[in-house]
Amino acid sequence: MERVISAEFFCAELDRRGFGFFSGVPCSFLKGPFALLEQRGSYVPAPNEGIALSMAAGAELGGTKAAVLAQNSGLGNLLDPLTSLVMAYEIPLLLFVSLRGWPDTADDEPHHAAMGAATLGVLQAVGVAHGVLEPTEESLSALLDRAARERAERRSFVVLVPAATVDTCAVPAAVADASLMTRQEAVEAVAGHLDGALVYSTTGMISRELFGVRDTPHTFYMQGSMGHAIGLGLGTALNRPDQRVVVVDGDGAALMHLGGLALVGERRPANLTHLVLDNGVYDSTGGQRTRDTAMRWDELALAAGYRTGQVCRTAKEADAHLAEIAGLPGPHLVALHIGRGGPTPPRVTSAHTNAGVRARFQAAAADTSKGLK
Ligand SMILES: Cc1ncc(C[n+]2csc(CCOP(=O)(O)OP(=O)(O)O)c2C)c(N)n1
């Protein structure tokens, strides 16, 4: 194995420097530190990077040194609190931001390309000090020394983490609960109810699983844009009342922009069904937990204003429930409790470009007279 910084050293350095509170949204580049931090009460997983940053700011204001770990795709979520809260009020924080799509955008999935190329420039533009981590302990220590100097001036510092810099091996193997349906079983059960609908599926493994089980032109595999599948679904449902729309979401993604659910419940499009595959973890980035307690999606949906909300624990139950609500006015929310882990499904980009997915989806949506199959 190439030389990389161990997750133990990474966390020990933060301990040594007195950091006492951690939050973030995971990236696979930081799997190791996330796995170690998760074992501590001082780490609180956040539903999105902006909340992670504001929580860290709150910890800091209360007297606890705080750090945030995130993927560069989450920069968009944290730029507002970074600039208008953390910088404006001179709250010095430490951020670790992974560099997906960098240094060569061609080496990563296409949805990372724009942010991969822009990350350093964005930080430069807003005026936050930053440095790129090299895979050595010396590099980490030097960057944390720089962060300490910025902190002394009440300024934040971002450590940028490229691929293969920090060891990812500290991750405990995902323990699958055999009593739960697998992601594949859930997607197979759901797939049987997607004929005739325009389908939006969320980022990561869920889109890949759906693509592996059933690849159709009227499925929009939304890789990236975590949490925004429901926005896509709502926009289409409101503007195409003639068309059934199904969103296949993950629990992490649905939690990231929970406001979308409130808007669905307020607008109440009868033609929208929202499926949430809840495994309690961010499976796509290494199985870090999303929450400690199970979310009551059925109650949440009803409180938000969905017409129905249901939790299903087996593929059979999901199949029966989806058959029951077919043809009934929505919006419906159906949460499927699924196990974590499982075989890695194929990448959508092994067969399609993103623009190709979009073009054939648009053509299918325009040509619904033939009926979707
Ligand atoms: C804004 C943003 N933050 C973080 C990520 C990294 N990321 C990609 S997939 C994923 C996990 C998604 O979790 P969930 O919706 O629960 O689905 P699962 O992976 O468990 O199938 C994360 C954190 C991202 N793509 N975008």
Image (cartoon, grey):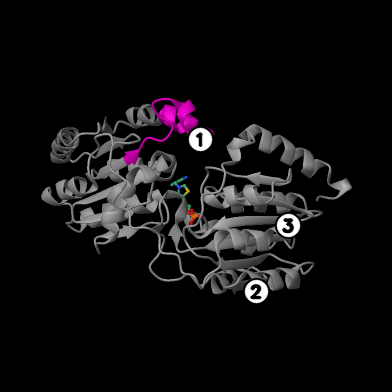
Query: The residue under label 1 is which amino acid type?
Result: Glu
Residue 269 spot, x, y in % from top left: 71, 60
Q: Residue at x 35, y 35 (%)?
A: 163
Amino acid type at image mark 2: Glu
Q: Residue at x 42, y 52 (%)?
A: 48
Say which of 184 and 285 sits in front: 184
Mark 2 surroundings within 10 Å by alpha-carbon count, few (fewer than 14), some (14 through 19), many (20 or more): some
Q: Confirm whether the magenta stretch covers residue 253.
A: no
For image coordinates 24% across by 45% down, the residue present is 93
Q: Which residue is under mark 2?
A: 317
Is the C-beta of the residue carrying label 2 under 8 Å from the nearest atom of ligand 1?
Answer: no
Residue 304 position (above or below residue 246):
below
Which of the two residues, 93 or 286, is positioned nearer the viewer here?
286
Measure the alpha-carbon separation of dots 3 and 1: 27 Å
Where does label 1 land, which residue? 109
Part of the protein shown in magenta: 97-118
Q: Is residue 117 magenta?
A: yes
Observer able to see residue 273 = no
CA–CA distance in space, label 3 to label 2: 16 Å
- Amino acid type, callout 3: Leu
In percent of width and height, residue 119 lies at 39, 31
Between discs 3 and 1, the one toward the N terminus: 1
Q: Is mark 1 within 8 Å of ligand 1?
A: no
Residue 197: tell me if it is visible. yes
Mark 3 or mark 2, which has the lower sequence index? 3
Q: Earlier in the sequence, mark 1 or mark 2?
A: 1
How many residues crowd mark 3 within 10 Å: few (<14), some (14–19), many (20+)?
A: many
Q: Tag on residue 194?
A: 3
